[in-house]
Image (cartoon, coloured by chain):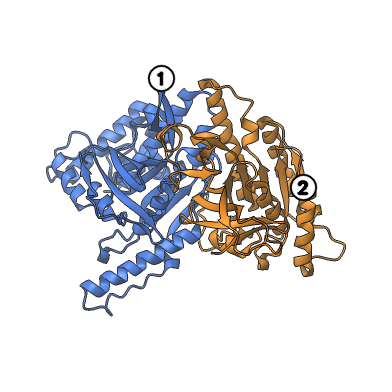
Amino acid sequence: MEIWRLPISASQRGKLISAGYTSLSSLSSISSSDLARELKVSESEAMNILKVASHSRGSETSNASCSIVEGAQSAWDMLHDEESLMHITTSSADLDNILGGGIHCKEVTEIGGVPGIGKTQLGIQIAVNVQIPNDFGGLGGKAVYIDTEGSFMVERAFQIAEACIEDMSEYNRFLRKDFQECKIKMQPQDILENIFYFRICSYTEQIALINYLDKFLSEHKDVKVIVVDSVTFHFRQDFDDMALRTRVLSGMALKLMNLANRFSLAVVLLNQVTTKHKEASFQLALALGDCWSHTCTNRIVLYWNGNERYAYIDKSPSLRSASAAYSITARGIRNSSSSCKRIKMM
Amino acid sequence: MKPQSLLQLTSQKCTIGCPILDRLLYGGIPCESITEIVAESGSGKTQICLQLSLHAQLPVSHGGLAASSLYLHTEFPFPFRRLHQLCLSFRSSNAHHFPVNDNPCDRIFVQSVHTADHLLEIMSKTDPFIENSKNQVPVRLIVIDSIAALFRSDFDNTPVELKRRSSLFFKISSKLKALAKRFNLAVLVTNQVVDLVGPNEGINGLRIGNLGCLHTSGRRVCPALGLAWANCVNSRLFLSRNEEVIREENEKSNGQSCDFVKKKMRKLYVVFAPHLPESSCEFEITREGLFGVER
């Protein structure tokens, strides 16, 4: 339904249209105070417009969606939605297993660990794997890679992309007879082209970019993952006022969560570790403090166990605590080669 | 803000002047990133730094950056005589790249640094310095030898001081990375080691990088400056030095009873790097410089 059919005054209608609101659905997610500011009308007037709009929208979609607030969903619908969402594989079956299929869309996943454990490797792998086409059980999406540390190496991304394409051809040869028909047309160059790479040199740039992503993503709807490598680096300097840092970080996390939800994409934040002084001893903890640990949906800690790399699910609303070994090979992240039982449920 | 195309983003490398070591490092020290060399004293850190600042002057077609370099040293005195020695052999082996009266040392700018704040001050002046040197050979390499010397005395072992210290690490690192990005520089820093006591691996039982334990001169060591600084570098290399007793193969002509001799075994390890696998290579230091040895 169009704005011009709303039963409101002509001047209000004019203001709405000149502010860019042409359809009713564009009014569904805006608050009355924002609308008042934008149209330069009083707040009560704006509230009235929204009420009329939501009323006529209600009568338009009269298929008994008896939600109290606009946009609310029942848990049943949400479950259905979630089941239809795809996961981004990490290329290690063990890791995917404890993650419940891979990195989840519509969620913020934080991955932390010591330098050299493979955070950047996992980040690059995810940015490549998100592009696996639908025919091969992937998302066929694109990736946004935000590099704050300068650790992204194109030659490494190229290697991983090459291995990913080789694996897909293998899969093709074994499971499909009609090899010619769905031959892979992808090239490593295409994979690299579909990673939108941003190099960030300060925390102000980082925040500005995340604010800008909103616009960028509405123009690139096929982006299915945002990787931030690392979210921490620029926040570990120049902040004397820790309360300010916490506020800035929470705001940023909220924006990312919002993006994840609106564009149904996965957000992967890589974090560093730090030592934490606790009861006269030092312990390892992910950086950015206690408040930050609330902001991510899932938390995965990477650590060394002997000579093997392990991933541990530290926090998740839907997954059980578990750890699994993985290894980093020339071809990217893969299962650990040792034959002992690799997955440990707790 | 626009995303960069990865296809146009080439990670250029700067040769360190030895094909064997270059192969281990996939071409040399990468631009737009910070590479750290960790080793105890006398292992060859400064040798690599000097050699790299000479080889950065080679044309791009020969693995160099066709550039001059900025050498910040915190340990005194600066080894001018060794640089001169290396320079002579560098010139004689690459004579066709340089005019007759040209001295490669002219393209190494040396600056001493005394404190961490002094380093920050210098870095803020580096921006205009590099920008204004456009008409000459551009600066494409920054060497800091060593970063550890700045931090090992001025700070107390209290939580407040340690916090101030780690905040400085991140500040220095992000300034360096911003410079590296802006001017497409390679950055090489050196770091010292601390001895490791106690049964655990690493500090507080924490293992950083691919190698479980770093051994040099028969001792267990770990890189100085702790976990916070480890987060600030992109790649970390480690040099070890061990004395090995080997049997002398050829009997000396005068028939002396010198059956066993001690030999220095030097090795370069990749501790972690985004583009390199876990690997190592033996090397030796000669009058002409530092060279990898293939076994």
Identified by mark 1, the residue type is: Ala
Rendered view: B163 above or below A300: above
| Residue on which the image places disc 1 | A280
Label count reads 2
- The x, y position of residue B117, in whole percent, is 67, 30
Identified by mark 2, the residue type is: Phe
Looking at the colours in the rendered structure, which chain would you say is drawn in blue? A
Q: Which quadrant is the C terminus of chain A positioned in?
A: top left
Query: Of the residues tagged 2 and 1, which is closer to the observer?
Result: 1
Q: Inspect this view and state whether residue A21 appears.
A: no
Q: Given the current orientation, which residue lies at the most extreme left position?
A: A64
Instruction: Assign a secondary structure to mark 1.
Output: loop
- Using the numbered discs, state the Cα–Cα distance from disc 2 to disc 1 in whole angstroms: 47 Å
Q: Residue placed at 61% from the left, 30% from the top?
A: B152
Mark 2 is surrounded, within 10 Å at the Cα level, by few (under 14), some (14 to 19) or many (20 or more) other residues, namely: some
Nearer to the camera, A100 or A210: A100
Q: Residue placed at 23% from the left, 39% from the top?
A: A321
- The x, y position of residue A340, in whole percent, is 24, 51
| Residue on which the image places disc 2 | B109
Chain B on-screen colour: orange
Q: Residue placed at 13% from the left, 46% from the top?
A: A63
Q: Is residue B72 left or right of residue A265?
A: right
- The x, y position of residue A124, in whole percent, is 41, 54
Chain of the residue under label 2: B
Q: Is residue B223 left or right of residue B188?
A: left
Chain of the residue under label 1: A
Q: Inspect this view and state whether residue B280 appears.
A: yes
